[in-house]
Image (cartoon, grey):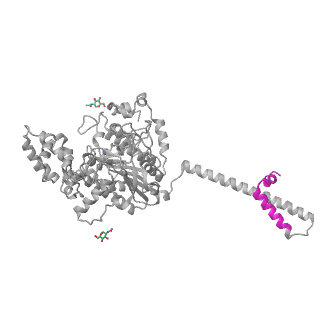
Amino acid sequence: MVSEQVSEQSPLLSNEGEGSTRADHGSDSGNGGADMDRRRRWSRLREAGIFIWALVATAAVIVIAVWAQHNQQTSRPPSRADKRNLVFMVSDGMGPASLSLTRSFRQHVDGLPDNDTLVLDKHFWGSSRTRSSNSLVTDSAAGATAFSCGKKSYNGAISVLPDYEPCGSVLEAAKRAGYMTGLVVTTDITDATPACFASHVLLRQMQDDIALQEVGHGVLGRSVDLMLGGGRCHFLPNGTDGSCRADDVDVVKLAQDKYGWTYTDSRDGFDKLKGGKKAKLPLLGLFASSDIPFELDRQNENDVYPSLSEMAKTALRALERATSDSDRGFFLMIEGSRIDHAGHINDPAAQVREVLEYDKAFKAVLDFIDDTQTETVLVATSDHETGGLATALQEPGHLPVYNWYPQALAQASSSCERLAGKLQDYVSKQPSPLSQSDLKTWINDELVVSGLGVTDATDEELSLLATDPDDATSNFAAIISLRAHVGWSTHGHTAVDVNVYSSGGPQAASIRGNVENTDVGKFLSHYLDVDVDAITEELREKTARPSVIAAAGAEHAAPQWTSNYHEYDGLQ
Ligand SMILES: *[C@@H]1O[C@H](CO)[C@@H](O)[C@H](O)[C@H]1NC(C)=O
Ligand SMILES: *[C@@H]1O[C@H](CO)[C@@H](O)[C@H](O)[C@H]1NC(C)=O
Ligand SMILES: [Zn+2]
């Protein structure tokens, strides 16, 4: 009875019932009333049957859907078909003008046609806006937080938001989801960009803490499986040779003993990894006390330091091998860290070699993608531009010249940083102060001509170098920039949009065109299908906050914030 009443309320079912009744009526006209009653009852029964069936079917569909969704949210077992790798490359401080500069430089030195382009050019995807939460001009910390957390923060923040609370990074979320993870850089592995993927501190200067968190000595435990780069000094206890830590914590030993890392600090150790085939993860490779030398200098020291592309290839193979039996792939961040440094110094000769090496590393990732069986996407962008680079320069008192001169960069065999180091070293080793003219002669012969490749340095230029060796880096850079007719507007960063590059495909469609840097960050976690918000919650639950933290405005925090391992052990 109940179902009958309900069926009458259901227009679909009752119409259907009426329809069939009418049809019966038409075809069986002339039959007796009892027959009609029987048919009507039969029709009602059928109606009820159909309705119950529909009800049960609907309920079953709902139950299955809810169960499936719940299952997906809680314990979605990864399948081979879902397996994917993500390589995220960061060209720190590389704006669009760096590409024009390097492209034309390469055409010049390699005798290539005017239409020859970089590998990057062929994979142009769009551009990214870069401002931070508190400034139109970002620094690398806020820039990398936009990538790691997908959120804007203040300049100096290492995966911490404007409320001074930590935000989960895509690398940490990836590790929790079963991916293997890696960081490859040419600067300190504790520097802002890599730091944002594997640590949380209020200020980027807190590199002692960053080192600890990166090896696993933080509230989340270990999230990184492979780290290659520079910055060894942050891992050695104070008082030992080559340490820059404020405390006496031996982070290398802690990493090995407590968190199972294998460690190498030499080119020989790098070579023994056999391009990743012999890498035992977790693997920590710190090949320089601080920065790995600029590529321009490193080329002459290849037996001491591996290059960015070599480290990238090794990392790719090591992570691929480590995930070969897994249903999850890997997340790898590769940074061309020192494009930014060349920009800060305003050294165009160093910068073009940095960009070329970055282009080579980009190509190595593309080759890996061609080769691997696992779906892999490469996305590459910059955190910001550095230097306000212009591929033209109007000299004061001169008319504009519609050209710049790559041949001036081709003559240089040393970076300005290296030349300044040599000058300071030379001056400090003199038993008695040199005469200005002797020093100028030495500077011209040994550094300007043979290092910069500039043969027409003026007396004024040489005097600047001789009188202020400590500030020689930017004076060398001004000499070569002028010869090349390359302009710079700042020794800092700028707000210009930066390019986005990708191996492409529908997966990366969401970051096509002009996007916000946080869109790039959101893409990373969406592509890997990992939950950064869950990591944020966990971090906020587990992070004890002494009142001093809550009280301190991070922007105004004094240098004493530079970490003390014991004090901040509980915090991070
Ligand atoms: C570049 O220019 C050369 C002629 O100088 C031409 O043969 C070649 O097809 C061009 N390449 C591209 C990619 O347009
Ligand atoms: C080294 O670190 C310890 C604490 O870890 C500190 O007591 C000591 O003063 C430090 N020494 C130097 C020379 O900085
Ligand atoms: Zn910078």
The chief SS type of the magenta part is: helix
Of residues 442 and 503, the one drawn nearer to the viewer in this rendering: 442
Expressed as whole percent of the image width and height from the top left, the position of residue 183 reads 36, 49
Expressed as whole percent of the image width and height from the top left, the position of residue 93 reads 32, 49
Residue 544 among those drawn in magenta: no
Quadrant in the picture for the C terminus: top left
Of residues 437 and 2, the one drawn nearer to the viewer in this rendering: 437
- Quick check: can you spot residue 310? no
> In this rendering, would 130 be left or right of 490?
right
Q: Residue at x 84, y 67 (%)?
A: 24
Residue range corresponding to the magenta coloring: 1-25
Task: Give the answer, above or below, for where 256 lies relative to 305.
Answer: above
Expressed as whole percent of the image width and height from the top left, the position of residue 554 reads 38, 34
- Tell me the quarter of the picture where residue 358 sits: bottom left
Task: Give the answer, above or below, for where 447 lies relative to 12.
Answer: above
Report the number of numbered marks: 0
Q: Residue at x 35, y 46 (%)?
A: 495
Ligand 3's quadrant is top left
- Tell me the quarter of the picture where residue 563 sits: top left
> In this rendering, would 35 be left or right of 437?
right
Expressed as whole percent of the image width and height from the top left, the position of residue 387 reads 29, 47
- Quick check: can you spot residue 487? yes
Residue 20 among those drawn in magenta: yes
Q: Residue at x 14, y 46 (%)?
A: 461
